[in-house]
């Protein structure tokens, strides 16, 4: 990796020096004889060479940690010193061989000018990143005025369940059920994060991401900048690295049950993307799609019996895995999918038996045709997946946020502008190899 970055930096720097030499060649009368000119040239040269680093630095999905900030500061300072010396040497060479003289600026100390320019450059690059890190780590949850509520709500999210499938094999006695247009999105996690948080993908930030496996390397580089030209483009084209899809780990907005839990409402959620519970459930299933649903449902019901939360939620992906991700013959796919639908019905019945009003949400899976479905065990007007988060907020006495484009179908309540950024305990989460292999065995990673 160091070699890839080093070669890319040398090539970029060489092209920059060539461009500078051509500029001076075309403008031999350019005045560069004063300390002020030196400061300007040094700062401009270092800023141009550091611009790709700045773009790379700010395109990470999560703020840097303190060690990363310190390391980056040292590297930028070193780059600035090297850039200033190299550009000064180039100017000196040009002056000697083209102008036949040694400019005054090369006869004076340059430490003060370099220090000022380096301090300005480092401030511009690192102070915003440090401020973002501190804000994310220490910000307290926004306090809001709520309405007292004792209602118990359970959200059952079934990936791969369409309106057409729900009509062909009913999976519970629902008071209302409606078809809806499926949500847009490049990845499963992106679409379900939109439902769980109620905000669009451009706000919650969950998206399809990729890691890099260097040729001959045993591990995947998981934390990459979206502007990493060296690894994404150069190394890929030269065959030195290969892109590998990864499950998303960065999310900028809380799910609605996380909003409730941070403000004292007992809540439990199982197997949702970008949460810690999913890795353990996928590992326990050992590549068995039906086992993922069984483990998730069992963990949810156990938590409900133990903690009696007001809000419970579970994500069940087995139907999507069986219908769209695994290579199965038609008869085996039919038998497996019917079994999954029966287990979903059993989960809904178990939650109803424990006193919960159940909301069922289904979305077409990867490449699957059909409409989304929203069904509830209590009367509700025609609903879409985007309506679920604000509706659950109102049912629990919380104001929806203005960031949620959906309608609150359970009554009117004034909206607040935003619940703010997600309260992340570990901002730079990574997946382990076991979780990665389980995702491959279930068809999420090809």
Image (cartoon, grey):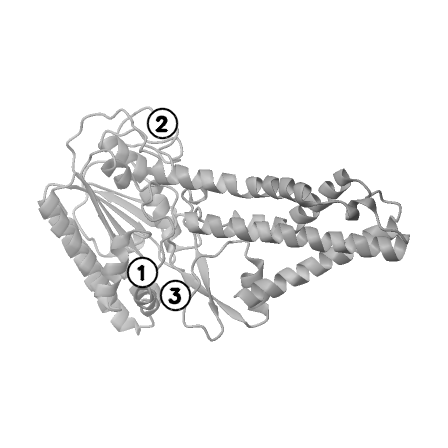
Residue 416 is marked as 2
Q: Which residue is mark 3?
A: 445
User: Where residue 14 appears, x then y in whole percent?
Assistant: 71, 60
> Where does the image place residue 185, in percent across and percent down from the top left?
43, 51
Q: Earlier in the sequence, mark 2 or mark 1?
A: 1
Relative depth, front residue between 44 and 204 = 44
Q: Residue furthest right?
A: 100
Give the CA separation, mark 3 to mark 2: 39 Å
Q: Which mark is residue 320?
A: 1
* 339 to the left or right of 427: left
In percent of width and height, residue 162 lies at 31, 53
Using residue 12 as the reference point, say whether residue 250 is left or right of it.
Answer: left
SS type, badge 3:
loop
Q: Earlier in the sequence, mark 1 or mark 3?
A: 1
Give me the residue at 33% from left, 38% from top. Answer: 387
- Measured Cα–Cα span from mark 1 to mark 3: 14 Å
Q: Name the secondary structure under disc 1.
A: helix
Q: Look at the image and tell me whether residue 27 can be seen.
A: yes
């Amino acid at each position: 990796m160091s070699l890839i970055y080093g070669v890319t930096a040398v090539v970029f720097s060489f092209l920059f020096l060539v461009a500078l030499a051509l500029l001076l060649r075309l403008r031999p009368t350019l005045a560069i004889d004063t300390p002020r000119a030196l400061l300007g040239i040094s700062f401009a040269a270092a800023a141009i060479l550091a611009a790709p680093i700045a773009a790379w630095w700010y395109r990470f999905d999560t703020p840097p940690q303190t060690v990363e900030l310190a390391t980056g500061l040292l590297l930028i300072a070193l780059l600035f010193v090297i850039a200033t010396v190299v550009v000064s040497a180039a100017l000196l060479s040009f002056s000697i061989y083209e102008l036949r003289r040694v400019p005054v600026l090369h006869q004076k100390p340059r430490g003060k000018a370099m220090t000022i320019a380096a301090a300005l450059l480092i401030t511009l690059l690192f102070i915003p990143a440090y401020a973002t890190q501190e804000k994310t780590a220490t910000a307290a949850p926004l306090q809001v005025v709520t309405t007292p509520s004792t209602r118990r709500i359970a959200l059952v999210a079934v990936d791969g369940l369409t309106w057409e499938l729900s009509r062909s094999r009913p999976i519970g006695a629902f008071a209302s059920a409606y078809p809806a247009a499926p949500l847009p999105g490049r990845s499963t996690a992106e679409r379900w994060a939109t439902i769980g948080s109620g905000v669009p993908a451009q706000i919650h930030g969950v998206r399809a991401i990729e890691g890099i496996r260097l040729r001959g390397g045993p591990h995947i580089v998981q934390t990459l900048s979206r502007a990493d030209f060296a690894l994404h483009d150069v190394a890929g084209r030269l065959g030195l690295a290969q892109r590998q899809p990864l499950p998303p780990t960065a999310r900028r907005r809380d799910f609605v049950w996380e909003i409730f839990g941070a403000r004292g409402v007992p809540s439990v959620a199982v197997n949702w993307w970008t949460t810690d519970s999913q890795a353990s459930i996928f590992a326990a299933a050992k590549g068995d799609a039906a086992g993922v649903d069984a483990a998730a449902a069992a963990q949810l019901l156990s938590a409900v019996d133990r903690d009696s939360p007001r809000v419970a939620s579970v994500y069940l992906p087995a139907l999507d895995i069986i219908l769209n991700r695994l290579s199965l013959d038609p008869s085996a796919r039919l038998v497996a999918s019917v079994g999954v639908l029966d287990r979903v019905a059993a989960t809904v019945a178990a939650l109803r038996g424990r006193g919960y009003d159940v909301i069922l949400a289904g979305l077409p899976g990867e490449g699957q045709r059909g409409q989304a479905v929203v069904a509830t065990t209590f009367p509700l007007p025609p609903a879409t997946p985007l309506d679920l988060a604000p509706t659950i907020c109102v049912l629990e006495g919380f104001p929806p946020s203005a960031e949620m484009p959906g309608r609150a179908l359970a009554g009117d309540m004034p909206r607040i502008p935003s619940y703010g950024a997600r309260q992340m305990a570990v901002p730079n989460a990574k997946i382990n190899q076991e979780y990665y292999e389980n995702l491959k065995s279930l068809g999420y990673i090809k």
